[in-house]
Image: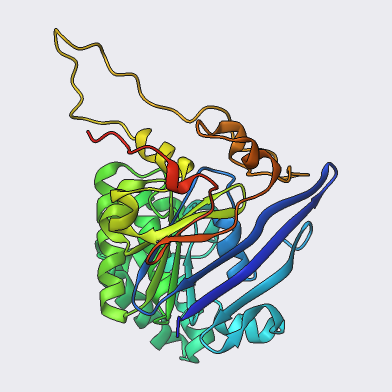
Amino acid sequence: MPVLAINDLRTHFHTRDGVVKAVDGVSLTLDRGETLGVVGESGCGKSVTALSVMRLVPAASGRIVGGSVRFEHTELLTLDAAAMRAIRGNRIGMIFQEPMTSLNPVMTVGRQISESVALHQHLPRRAAMDRAIEMLTLVKMPEPRRRAGEYPHQLSGGMRQRVMIAIAMACTPAILIADEPTTALDVTIQAQILDLMLEMKGRTGAAVMLITHDLGVIAETAQRVVVMYAGRKVEEAPVKALFARPRHPYTRGLMTSIPKLNRVPSETTAPHRLTEIAGVVPSLIDMADGCTFAPRCPHVTEQCRVAYPPQIEAAPGHFVACWNAESLPEMARV
């Protein structure tokens, strides 16, 4: 039984211009101990899916209008607020995209970690602070006891992200949701943060949902991948199968747009232009009946413009929503 099962999740935002279908019928599962990668362009619904699982969709305009989110044996969407608070931050931890806006600027980082531990594990203040310092040590924070008494603005970006990991893992959750945890960090710190997340996962046995733009990160860390586009899941596969044979044109576009460092022009070859996906992610208000990727797809047919394709299992464990998945030409190998 998966530790997390999302079925036909639909999250909408009500705006002056109309209803934005940010998540439109997404289904996925997360098995115990696995790392699931969720990829796609900005605006594809990755973060809103994570916020829906945590029941943190902004109440002013956002609504979860349908679907199911089951954590172990519990349906999260029907829980009352108190029961959801007992799970959020305790059994399900989340690393948010931007730590500077997620951390409280007027509380020391040690107090922010200890507050979560005290709330969920009912520890006295001193024991909770000891646990906070222990967590800062585990995430390899230099001088953890001193850093526990500092405020977020006194820390570097990498240190703040380590604090976020410490908060998320302090109660030993069953699930860790990481929403682009390496955003705005330089590549050296990115590698350290990813290694740290995997090390913490190994210590606790937590399942990880890793949301990212970086397919290279997915290739190195995940066992399974979900590709999202315009609020929907367009492809899902084991990592090796996805990189060996991507079956959706959007997934192919993401892969071919990665810069190739081994493509060096010589005297006999012209400089190679970086491949791009034409157009932009469509408006999520009043979307057409056909495939949402059709206006940008190089393999579009008339059928694509008329009806949205169903999810088919093109290979064992490899699902794709594309009318032409079986007839796409082979990708050029570099």
What number of labels is visible? 0
Q: Nearer the viewer, residue 225 or 244?
A: 244
Is 159 above or below relative to 273? below
Residue 328 in picture, x, y percent from top left = 42, 40
Front residue (pair 220, 93): 220
Q: Is residue 302 left or right of residue 186?
A: right
Give the farthest residue toward the right.
16
Instruction: Specify whether 274 is left or right of 46.
Output: left
Picture quadrant where residue 204 is located? bottom left
294 or 265: nearer the viewer:
294
Residue placed farthest to the top in the image? 267
Q: Is residue 304 above or below residue 25?
A: above
In the rendered image, residue 125, in percent from the top left (x then y), is placed at 46, 86
Q: Position of residue 44 (x, y in %)?
A: 57, 48
Which quarter of the figure has residue 316? bottom left
Observer-nearest residue: 51 or 23? Answer: 23
Which residue is at 51% across, 60% downward? 312
In this rendering, is residue 244 above or below 93? above
The residue at 30%/31% (across/down) is 259
Q: How is the image coloured?
A: rainbow
Image quarter (top left, top right, bottom left or bottom right) of the N terminus: bottom left
Quarter of the image with the C terminus in it: top left
Give x and y (percent) for residue 182: 38, 50
Q: Is residue 67 visible to the viewer in this orientation of the structure?
A: yes
At a point 64% along the width and 68% down the height, the residue shown is 8
Evaluate whether residue 149 shows in this view: no
